[in-house]
Image (tube, rainbow, N blue to C red):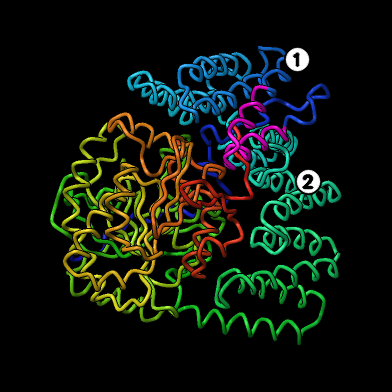
Amino acid sequence: MDQKRRLPQTSKRSGRVLCGLALAVFLLGAAAVPASAETPPDFTELNRQIPGLAQAGEAAEALALARKYVAEARTASGEDSAEYATAVTWLAWMLRREQNYDKAAPLLERALTIRERVFGPDHALVATSLHNLAGVYFDQGREDEANALIVRAETIKAEVDGVGDLEMMPRRIAELSQAGKPGEALDLAQRYVTLTKERYGPDQPPIVPALLELAFLYETQGRIDQAEALLKEGLAIREKAFGENSLESAESLDQLARLYQTNGREDEAEALLKQSLAIRRAALEETDDLVIESLYALAGLYEEQGLRANAEKLYAEAEALQTKRTGEAAFSVEHPSYAVVRVYYATDRKRTGDEDPAEAYGGDRGPLTYGVAEVSIPRDHRMGEVERPSIWRLEWCEDPERFVVLLSLDEKDKKAFFKDVQERVKSSRRKSAFIFVHGYNVAFVDATRRTAQMAYDLGFGGAPVLYSWPSQASYSSYKVDETNAEWSRHDFQNFLKDFAKRSGADDIYLIAHSMGTRVLTGALKELFLEEPKLREKFDEIILAAPDIDADTFSRDIAPKILAGERRATLYASSGDYALMASKSFAGYRRAGDTAGGITLAPGVDTIDASATSTDFVGHSYYADSVSVLGDLRDLIMRKKRAEERKRLSPVEIDAGRYWTFEEEAASP
């Protein structure tokens, strides 16, 4: 290409949007009953205890507790209640873990029927039940029925009424506020909080965004005490879940400090801003965006108080760090309302000839091509999300102020590509890079956006690199993707060899997802046989939801690519329905699926991410979940092994040790 492919400039728009709020499968929908005086107080605790016991290897105790839950829900609410549906779903979850699919299926069919009647056929919880049932149908070999359920669930997600759908509520609240309808906005925000608590439980981290929406409206209407109470509630939830010195808690401290500052309570605001700054300095590199943001916030408060000398000192420190950061960050703040992430890419997709960057590469095979993509990240970006336009606004151009947008592509020859990579790596403090290989059913544009989101959310200072193989970006094209993933191994092997020798990176992290793990591990096996010394070039191999036969991975792959060294991390989940679909094709459990057991191998830290909030089919938790992103940051940015990472808790079984996330409890 002689010129960059750029999107047309869009009109500037303001406002907030929340896209892709996670719908977990078997992992969400706990406490799916509106709170009432008759609901026994221990039901929420049961929702936590059952997965906790199961993941600790106490299956008999967990099963007994699930049966108790069913009996108590029947007595308290009746067999046609939403609470009963949640209870039988938990029982089915336990039976499925024991591979008792014939008993699990009718329970999930019953739960689906109840939720359809109670919530309506197009409710998000109905979609959750559809995915739950599809998973068991896959286990039973009923692929056609399972696929039909998944199609219906995805249709619900795409077409639900905006007012009733959690994903659309923040957008609707903002629209009502901007239209001068504060009463309606407040009613919807209160409903948003209620529904979020029903889905996740009353004290779980995913409800905090809803609390913030309602607090903001209370503040704009002068109801400061109520806003303060909600912000304190959100802070308490995050401190309990993540720890008082966590980055999540620091964010809540900032939000409460802003409320105090704008309402004349400067002393209280100062104490909270100092606490937030201390947390971020302890947890992050000095040039991290959040540290600089905290310095500016505290300086602004001092300026308001007339403490000019204090303010100038902090302003100077922030500006010095910002200047230093310019050469370190993988992204730049070229515009006041969005950042731009430079993603270096290599792909063996065929060019389409389309001038739109989003359509430049299709699903056909092509020669290995190199380039640099520029991707926008909006200033109000929420960690773990790839903000996208909703179906309600398909006629709009993509707006980088609101969404993660592929702005441009600049193809380069190999020499120019590696020259650019070397410059990026050299300018970063740790001389680092990561290479991301996407999975099945992913378009080039989506892989590029995901790479940018990960780099931004991790605060990665080195070169973020995407390797994109010719996936068809179609749910029904699994077999074609499987064939193309195999075909791409040779190209990727050559790319890895070149990258190890020509990038100038001291630290190289390899991250692969789903079917992309086959591309990565297949290439590494051949590469290390050919040049064993190159193994030392790669600091960590991260396999997220690997779509690889579990036994083959443990017996053939891990020993060859690791040689016993502890240099790999495997994230897996029991709620990964894409991998259950894969199992239906292959006949055997996948390494990324913990439903039938945990995949352990020498040199591999296996992390069971079943308890984290994740995407609609439980398959992209590596980049969607704040918990997993935080764990990746500890692994990549701080080089901490599993036993050193505070979010993880060890689980000992006969075959060895694996790790689970402490802060979020699974629920159906």
Residue matched to label 1:
75
Residue 402 is a magenta residue:
no
Q: Is residue 53 magenta?
A: yes
- Mark 1: which secondary structure? helix
Q: Label 2, on which residue?
A: 218
Q: Position of residue 118 (x, y in %)?
A: 63, 16
Quadrant, the C terminus: top right
Residue 236 seen from this side: yes
Q: Position of residue 93 (x, y in %)?
A: 54, 28
Q: Which residues are magenta?
A: 44-67
Quick check: 591 left or right of 266? Answer: left
Whichever of callouts 1 and 2 sits on the residue coming sooner in the sequence is 1
Please, what is the three-letter code of the amino acid marked with disc 2? Tyr
The location of residue 108, given as percent across then percent down, is: 53, 19
- Residue 364, horizontal then vertical, whole percent: 17, 45
Q: Nearer the viewer, residue 107 or 332?
A: 107
